[in-house]
Image (cartoon, helix red, strand yellow):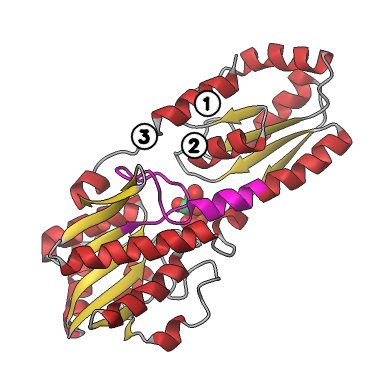
């Protein structure tokens, strides 16, 4: 019986728990011994590694976050700690690793593989949806649905009070969450880090719209834009002349019960990751594009920069219409 371990690294996403559940079940079905590595690479360095069973994953499919914890490990950037991590895997005779994480975690894994040859398969998991080579990362659908619920609720007050609302989403340097949310919530303004927007152009349009009867505005902005969120609110008050409030969605968009889509994607990502490892793929990431899964080399994913889908960017231009 071979030993296989799973770990979560970086920001937690809703979908990690369903992935853990399927990992244990699929490992046992394939006569592999499943192990959990607790608290990400930090736990790997500190030997927080335990054999997992059905009991560990009972009742977690509907829970956000990750039962085994996660971390952003500064120590894993240093060769001495990576050596310690490899020794811990050896102590438990772990042959294969499934890694759920974002681009930073994959970069760490790429170095770890080159140094120590630990066989692994990466599963893209970040609400930012900013990993090169895959159009979908686990957790994004749940985050988008939470954002949608929040914006729909904020619209009630915006329309009742005739206010502008500046709503900030997460996403780091990637505008995916903000753009998709703006498109699907009927927002008037969307600002993302990928595109420098000219607010002066919006000023003329918004004033015309107010003259034509518009009573309120929803602006969805990504946390990575160069302006501060408060500055955009100030712009609405001073230039557009409308009472404005700010709502920073923050960490509520990272948690919550995983959607059906994320539960199913967790199932599929894990099945493909483990099949790949069993078929001898030693250093790949399982990616999802155009409705299908494919294995890409870690270098193709970790060392490339994600760019926003061109079709989405064209919709951004339509939405801006300035
Ligand atoms: O990568 C996911 C993410 O939630 C980003 O959108 C956000 O910028 C960041 O993590 C927050 O990081 P932390 O959990 O370290 O505060």
Vertical side of 93 occupied by 133: above or below: above
Spatial separation of the CA atoms under disc 3 and disc 2: 10 Å
SS category of the residue bearing label 2: loop
In the rendered structure, the answer to whether residue 248 lies left or right of residue 9 reads right
Instruction: Identify the magenta region.
Output: 123-148
Magenta span has 2?
Answer: no
Mark earlier in primary sequence (3, 2): 2
Residue 316 numbered tag: 1
Residue 307 numbered tag: 3
Residue 175 numbered tag: 2
Question: Residue at left 68%, top 50%?
Answer: 149
Number of numbered markers: 3
In the rendered structure, the answer to whether residue 296 lies left or right of residue 22 reads left
1 and 2 marks in contact (CB < 8 Å):
yes
Indicate the position of residue 128 as horizontal and vertical percent values: 46, 47
Indicate the position of residue 6 as horizontal and vertical percent values: 31, 72
Spatial separation of the CA atoms under disc 1 and disc 2: 10 Å
């Amino acid at each position: 019986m071979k030993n296989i371990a799973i770990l979560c690294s970086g920001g937690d996403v809703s979908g990690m728990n369903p992935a853990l559940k399927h990992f244990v079940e699929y490992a046992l079905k394939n006569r592999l011994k499943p192990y959990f590595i607790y608290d990400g690479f930090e736990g790997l360095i500190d030997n927080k590694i335990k054999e997992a069973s059905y009991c560990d994953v009972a009742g977690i499919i509907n829970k956000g976050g990750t039962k085994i914890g996660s971390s952003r490990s500064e120590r894993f950037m240093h060769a001495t700690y990576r050596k310690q991590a490899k020794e811990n895997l050896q102590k438990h005779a772990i042959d294969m690793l499934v890694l759920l994480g974002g681009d930073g975690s994959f970069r760490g894994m790429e170095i770890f593989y080159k140094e120590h040859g630990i066989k692994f398969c990466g599963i893209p998991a970040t609400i930012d949806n900013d990993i090169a080579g895959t159009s979908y990362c686990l957790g994004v659908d749940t985050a988008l649905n939470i954002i949608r619920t929040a914006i729909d609720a904020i619209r009630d007050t915006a329309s009742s009070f005739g206010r502008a609302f500046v709503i900030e989403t997460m996403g780091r340097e990637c505008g995916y969450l903000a753009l998709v949310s703006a498109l699907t919530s009927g927002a008037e303004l969307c600002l993302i880090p990928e595109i420098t927007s000219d607010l002066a152009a919006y000023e003329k349009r918004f004033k015309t719209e107010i003259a034509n009867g518009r009573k309120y505005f929803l602006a969805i902005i990504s946390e990575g834009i160069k302006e501060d969120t408060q500055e955009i609110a100030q712009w609405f008050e001073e230039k557009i002349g409308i009472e404005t409030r700010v709502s920073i969605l923050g960490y509520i968009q990272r948690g919550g019960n995983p959607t059906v889509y994320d539960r199913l994607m967790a199932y599929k990502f894990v099945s493909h990751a483990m099949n790949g490892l069993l078929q001898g793929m030693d250093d790949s990431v399982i990616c999802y594009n155009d409705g299908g899964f494919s294995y890409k080399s870690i270098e193709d994913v970790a060392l490339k920069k994600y760019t926003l889908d061109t079709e989405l960017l064209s919709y951004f231009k339509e939405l801006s219409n300035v």
